[in-house]
Amino acid sequence: MNRLYRPIHLWLLTGLILFLIPPGWVSAWAWQYGLRWAFVLAIALFMTSLFTPLCIHYAFRLNVLDIPNDRKMHSHPIPRMGGLAIYLALLLTTVRNFQFSREVSGLMAAVTVIFVVSLIDDIRGLSAFSRLAAQLVAAGILLSSGVRINFIPAMPGEALIEMAITVVWLVGITNAFNFLDGVDGLAGGMGVVCASLFFVIAWETRQSYISYFMAALTGGCLGFLPYNWRPARIFLGDSGSTLIGFSLAGLAVIGTWADNNPVVALSTPLLILSIPIFDMIYTTVSRIKNDQVHNVREWLEFTGKDHFHHRLMHLGLDEKRTVGFILIVNLCLGLGAVVIRNTANPLGAGLLLFQAVLIFIMIVILMLLGRQTSSSS
């Protein structure tokens, strides 16, 4: 245990002090100068940095380890309780620093359900049905908080259709992040990039509750990344990847991304979350076409090396370059979402969306080349 704490420096202690000092001191100063978001981000980062070594220690004691096999890329058991560190940092930071709106309160409750059930799955193992049931319950909690997609035109059954689409979105993005968590630093890095992009837009549009939650999520993922970057000392586990995925999916629905422009409002979260969405759709279609999955249970449980990061590594990239490449592509697409909402010219917005299509055409080409390389090796 002492060995884990040797690298902890004074700035970690400073973060703990920032968390413990009474409201109205540094937090009031940060609020006065428009830096409350940075204060929230810093506390989440410090909290995760403090909790992660504890999670590493107790994961070994409790034997909550990811054991290597022929489908794994690591060669020795690695703790898989990283989600606990991020969840505690997110919870304590948000409770400490701002009051919740009804929607964000519902999101925090739903995230808690997702996290607890996924943590049990990391420790003991649960069936695909149990995991899916928990995700549906969490989606129901968010719906009961008044959160749902609302771009469907007025028609009979409009509310039911919107609720169904919202559930599919929440469950889909949650599992997309879980599927993408196959390389050291990838899911956590995606959490940083996506949450930061959502934060920029939410801050510009004065959506304070969303901004602070996104800042806390960004800080939590940033604090975890040094421990998860290759060679990883700890994994997120399903509890961490699903927590990040559901948080981003929920905030994408809660937020208002454009006024009187449904195309921009819809395209903004799609562009920011486009890499996990694409990866999930591509692998799902490929597995169904190749007769590898036949139902939802098999879809949730299937573990293959056919994801975007696997295909890039088949082309010769190492893990760090693969993660860096994917994060850069995701950032490019996300910056398009930031720019498009400020583009008054419909032609300019259309060109930005066309650019995103071209990027995905290149990604598909890389996926196909990676598959051919894998088959020939």
Image (cartoon, grey):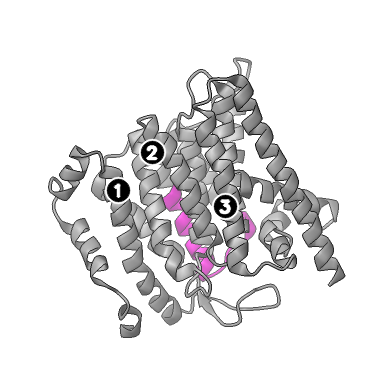
Horizontal and vertical percent position of residue 294: 79, 53
Is the magenta region chiefly helix, strand or loop?
Answer: helix
**Where are the magenta residues, as a range?**
111-133
Q: For the point 69% across and 57% down, which residue is it?
A: 308
* Disc ID at residue 210: 2
Graded by Cα atoms within 10 Å as few (under 14), some (14 to 19) or many (20 or more), the crowding at tag 1 reads some
Residue 308 on the magenta span: no
In the image, 113: left or right of 285?
Answer: left
Which corner quadrant of the image does residue 300 belong to? bottom right
Q: Amino acid at mark 2?
A: Ile
Mark 1 residue element: helix
Mark with earlier residue (1, 3):
1
* Disc ID at residue 278: none
Mark 3 residue element: helix
Mark 2 residue element: helix
Q: Amino acid at mark 3?
A: Ile
Q: For the point 64% across and 74% down, which residue is it?
A: 73
Horizontal and vertical percent position of residue 342: 49, 27
Q: Are marks 1 and 3 in contact (CB under 8 Å)?
A: no
Q: Are marks 3 and 2 in contact (CB under 8 Å)?
A: no
3D distance between C-alphas at marks 3 and 2: 24 Å
Quarter containing the C terminus = bottom right
Q: Amino acid at mark 1?
A: Ala
Picture layout, residue 10 above or below residue 203 = below
Quarter containing the N terminus = bottom left
3D distance between C-alphas at marks 1 and 2: 14 Å
Residue under numbered circle 1: 38
In the image, 133: left or right of 12?
Answer: right
Residue under numbered circle 3: 328
